[in-house]
Image (cartoon, helix red, strand yellow):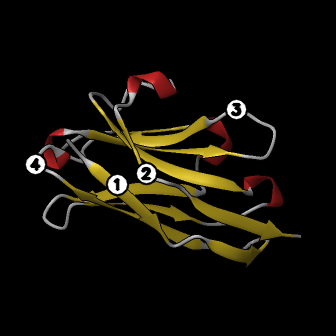
């Protein structure tokens, strides 16, 4: 069992940066792949990126490559999403999720979810 709580969302101007955090509790965190998803109003939830349990492998959606970076600190039971060069189209609720592999991009492959944090990018 893993419980996830996201933080760090907010309002930022286009071109700015935000760092999201996802604090996890539960014995399975260090053995779980972690992912960030986002969901804009009226749209489906899509993967932003994922990181392996060790932190040694990552995956990024094309629309964030070169701008976002996922990292994790297993000693702190926390995964991060550093978001740079933000665009208005990045506006969404961002969710972290825990699952068996960083290679999965489908929402139904992830077993545990946080409540989400709102990111709003103004133009």
- Determine crowd level at label 1: few under 14, some 14-19, many 20+ residues with C-alpha closer than 10 A: many
Q: CA distance from mark 4 to mark 2?
A: 16 Å
Is the residue under label 1 in contact with that under label 3 (CB below 8 Å)? no
Which residue has dot 4 on it? 27
Earlier along the polypeptide chain: callout 1 or callout 2?
A: 1
- Determine crowd level at label 3: few under 14, some 14-19, many 20+ residues with C-alpha closer than 10 A: few
Which residue has dot 3 on it? 44
Is the residue under label 2 in contact with that under label 4 (CB below 8 Å)? no
Query: Disc 4 on helix, strand or loop?
Result: loop
Task: Give the x, y percent position of residue 113.
Answer: 41, 44
Determine the residue positioned at 75% across, 72% down.
15
Which residue has dot 2 on it? 114
Q: Quadrant of the N terminus?
A: top left
Q: Report the side of 13 relative to 82 (left or right).
A: right
- Determine crowd level at label 4: few under 14, some 14-19, many 20+ residues with C-alpha closer than 10 A: few
Task: Give the x, y percent position of residue 117.
Answer: 56, 62
Which residue has dot 1 on it? 4
Task: Give the x, y percent position of residue 59.
Answer: 44, 37
Q: CA distance from mark 2 to mark 3?
A: 16 Å
Earlier along the polypeptide chain: callout 4 or callout 2?
A: 4
Q: Report the side of 93 relative to 51 (left or right).
A: right
Q: CA distance from mark 3 to mark 1?
A: 21 Å
Query: Disc 2 on helix, strand or loop?
Result: loop
Earlier along the polypeptide chain: callout 4 or callout 1?
A: 1
Number of numbered labels in the structure image = 4
Q: Quadrant of the C terminus?
A: bottom right
Earlier along the polypeptide chain: callout 3 or callout 1?
A: 1
Is the residue under label 2 in contact with that under label 1 (CB below 8 Å)? yes
Q: CA distance from mark 1 to mark 2?
A: 5 Å
Determine the residue positioned at 72% across, 76% down.
12
């Amino acid at each position: 069992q893993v419980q996830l709580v996201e933080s760090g969302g907010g309002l930022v101007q286009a071109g700015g940066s935000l760092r999201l955090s996802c604090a996890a509790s539960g014995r399975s965190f260090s053995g779980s792949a972690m992912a960030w998803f986002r969901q804009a109003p009226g749209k489906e939830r899509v993967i932003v990126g994922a990181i392996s349990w060790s932190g040694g492998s990552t995956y990024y959606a094309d629309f964030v490559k070169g701008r976002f970076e996922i990292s994790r600190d297993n000693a702190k039971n926390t995964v991060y999403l550093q978001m740079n060069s933000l665009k208005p189209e990045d506006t969404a609720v961002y969710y972290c999720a825990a699952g068996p592999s960083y290679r999965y991009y489908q929402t139904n492959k992830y077993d545990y979810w946080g409540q989400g944090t709102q990111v709003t990018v103004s133009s």
